[in-house]
Image (spheres, rainbow, N blue to C red):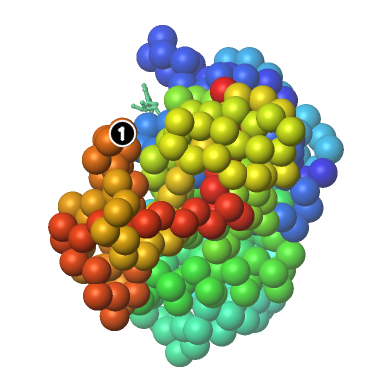
Amino acid sequence: MELELKNISVTLSNKKILKSINLKVENGEFISLLGASGCGKSTMLKTIAGIIKQSEGSILLGGNIADKIPAYRRRTVIVFQDFRLFPHMTVLENISFPLKMLCIHKSQRRKEAIELLKKVKLEGYEDRHVNKMSGGQMQRVALARALAAKPIVLLLDEPFSSLDINLRKDMRELVLKLQREYKITTILVTHDQEEALTMSDRIAFMHNGHIEQYDTPENIFKNPVNTIVADYFLEGAYIHGEIINNKFISDLFNFNINKENGKYKCLIRPLAVKVNKDDNSNFEVIEKVYQGDNYLLKLNNTSSNLGLESIVPDSVDIVEGDRVNIELEKDKLIFIRE
Ligand SMILES: Nc1ncnc2c1ncn2[C@@H]1O[C@H](COP(=O)(O)OP(=O)(O)OP(=O)(O)O)[C@@H](O)[C@H]1O
């Protein structure tokens, strides 16, 4: 186990920001802390790094209690959104700095720093001052400098959010490539669900200072433990019902489904709704929204007032005002216990 948080609570200005957090991260794992603004993601990262002191609980790094180790000796490095490079130094000096702190000999420092520059595709930029570089280039220098510190755990605090969309994609790929090459245990803070889903081995979904669910991307998307997690990924309509002997029974839909007996909320996301024109149906298309290569249809059930949405190809001939028959794709429905 590379990192373990045991019952970590953090109080700042008399406000409890983190509430009894438990988290285990395996050696070489890439995990994301995901959640809405203000849920405590950055506070958690800073607490792991020793920049913020927890009021309760313990942090274990590589199996050893790290609570009394000061931030500069913890071997946990944070890459911040605003890079925090040394502006008066060149690229090479920035990357060499942590190597100097690790007491590595000058000639070896230069060799290692140049090697890292190659890894982040900045060969030839050794003598450039960092304040003469673009945001994307500064981000690469920050990443190389973080790797130079040979951290036990690499902490990334929304590192891509200031980059434009194409650069963000390139940086995500570069970070993942280096993370796998160096097999470095990494924690990414993000509020971007796509980023978390595509990059992580596991996602810790946070809400209001708690971890609501810690799971693989696939599980957290398909089997959210509650509506807070479910709605963050993709909203839809909820219908209440009961499963009795592998049959879901509700006021609107009844169908066979292989699940334990009990009361459930069934989340119907747009991807689960297929439609066909049917003049006798109670569902009416009230809006058709162009989304690039498809349309979102907003539907309303005229007798129950249930609103549903469906994604259809841009070639579809359904228009606003049409009546449509609904077919649910059962493997795309989400069931949450009541
Ligand atoms: N030094 C502080 N004193 C008091 N409250 C703080 C302090 N730092 C952060 N907070 C509060 O703690 C809560 C969590 O903040 P934090 O920055 O950890 O959230 P976050 O999930 O990273 O948010 P964001 O995505 O916006 O960066 C917020 O309500 C914030 O206002």
Residue in front for this viewpoint, 86 or 315: 315
Q: Is residue 221 left or right of residue 232?
A: right
Q: Residue furthest bottom?
A: 124
Work out which quarter of the rendered image holds the N terminus and state it.
Answer: top right
Which of the 4 image quadrants contains residue 277?
bottom left
Residue type, label 1: Ser
Q: Is residue 37 left or right of residue 286?
A: right
Secondary structure, mark 1, is: loop
- Residue at x 65% of width, y 31% of height: 243
Measured as percent of width and height from the top left, residue 297 is found at: 27, 59
Q: Is residue 126 above or below residue 190?
A: below
Residue in front for this viewpoint, 68 or 162: 162
Measured as percent of width and height from the top left, residue 322 is found at: 21, 60
> Visible in this render: residue 24?
yes
Q: Is residue 326 above or below residue 312?
A: above
Q: Is residue 292 left or right of residue 220?
A: left
Taking the image as four quarters, which one is ligand 1 found in?
A: top left
- Residue at x 62% of width, y 81% of height: 115
For label 1, the crowd category at 10 Å Cα-Cα, with few meaning under 14, some 14 to 19 and many 20 or more, is few
Q: Which residue has dot 1 on it?
A: 304
- Residue at x 45% of width, y 76% of height: 170
> Visible in this render: residue 203?
no
- Residue at x 74% of width, y 65% of height: 183
Say how many tags the image has. Answer: 1
Measured as percent of width and height from the top left, residue 9 is found at: 58, 19
